[in-house]
Amino acid sequence: MPKTRSAPDIWILIPLLAILGIGVVMVYSASSVLAFHNFGDSFYFLKRQLFFAGLGLVAMYFTMNTDYWVWKKVAKVGLIVCFGLLILVLIPGVGVVRGGARSWLGISSFGIQPSEFMKLGMVIFLSKLLSEEQSKITQFTKGLLPPLGIMGLAFGLIMLQPDLGTGAVMVGASILIIYVAGARMLHLGSLALVGIAGFVGLILAAPYRLKRITAFLDPWSDPLGAGYQAIQSLYAVGPGGLVGLGLGMSRQKYSYLPEPQTDFIFSIIAEELGFIGGITVLALFLVLVWRGMRTAITAPDTFGSLLAVGIVGMIAIQVVINIGVVIGMFPVTGITLPLISYGGSSLTLMLTCLGILLNISRYSR
């Protein structure tokens, strides 16, 4: 185990805090009208976001100062707990339905998403498994199938909610870890074809997903239904121009764009802060991903390297999907923008993950 610990990578910490600050400001800007209309308090979402940001920063401070190999010791127990929560949330009367998905555990407006915990639990477990059995990863039956089977089981439970977006992020980060661990491209390529076929099957099995695909190809075929969010998002992005309409001056947040403080908050950023604001956010994420990958490359052991890859993969995949949806490159999915979108579980867990990444950076060579 590595012994010498230095200061965390400042170039991970600076963009992280900058993105979080932008998120707090934009959550208020995007949600103030909706919050006043629904709750009589324009600061309703802001106060909750500040609470979860504070909670997340405390968790990040803890994980940043907890030696990362501790997570290797609790990886199995953590994964079992995550599976238990995924099963628990599916029980009628226990799991809470929000947005058409039984994805929440909690009371009233406070709750947690077990699928968010599973993303981190899966990344930690696969990093442990593949760091200990890396020599087997080139063997399809003994090396590749066990991690894929565990990942597939988790994905299946998440899809029973259903939550395709979170499941896709977990699968993407897991495949990235498996690839970096040394899996053969022939095996992964063959499985990718099977995965594509399965993905098509999932779309065809649920009419609402098929509607999202057709709306993605031609939003105007159903402008008041499946294509509504995509069209309203583009109506926000387009008028933003170079410098935007000004902070707080969004027109789409006036009940045109549904839930502007969550999945489509980047639309409001583009509308109010323009191309410059959007590019600034993307540049901050790019620095964060770059330094995260540098941490993975310079980590002192295989577990730390794979764990850093998984955490960075979660962030990068989520950013690509979210912004891709906002600008019309991907069909609409329920994916938040990391550190920026309103949300308790997602924000707290992301800061916890970044704390682990910062701790790994303290041991980088």
Image (cartoon, rainbow, N blue to C red):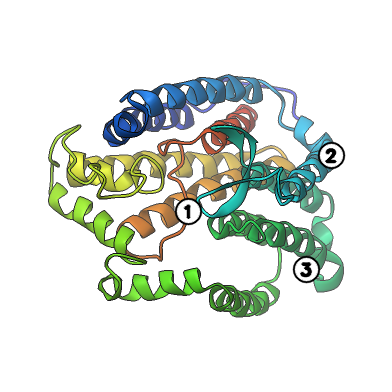
Task: Tell me the kind of residue under disc 3.
Answer: Thr
Q: Nearer the viewer, residue 279 or 196?
A: 196
Helix, strand, or loop for circle 3? loop
- The amino acid sitting under disc 2 is Val
Question: Secondary structure beneath disc 2?
Answer: helix
Q: Mark 3, residues whose alpha carbon is within 10 Å: few (<14), some, or many (≥20)?
A: some
Report x, y in % for residue 345.
57, 36
Quarter occupied by the N terminus: top right
Observer-nearest residue: 183 or 102? Answer: 102
Q: For the residues marked 3 and 1, what is the alpha-carbon distance in whole angstroms?
A: 34 Å
Q: Which mark is residue 77?
A: 2
Reading the image, the residue beneath label 3 is 138
The quarter in which the C terminus is drawn is: top right
- Callout 2: 10 Å neighbours few (<14), some, many (20+)? few
Q: Is residue 272 left or right of residue 40?
A: left
Q: Which residue is mark 1?
A: 334
Q: Position of residue 223 (x, y in %)?
A: 27, 67
| Residue 201 horizontal/vertical position (percent) | 60, 78
Q: Is residue 56 visible?
A: yes
Q: Is residue 104 above or below residue 168?
A: above
Q: CA distance from mark 2 to mark 1?
A: 28 Å
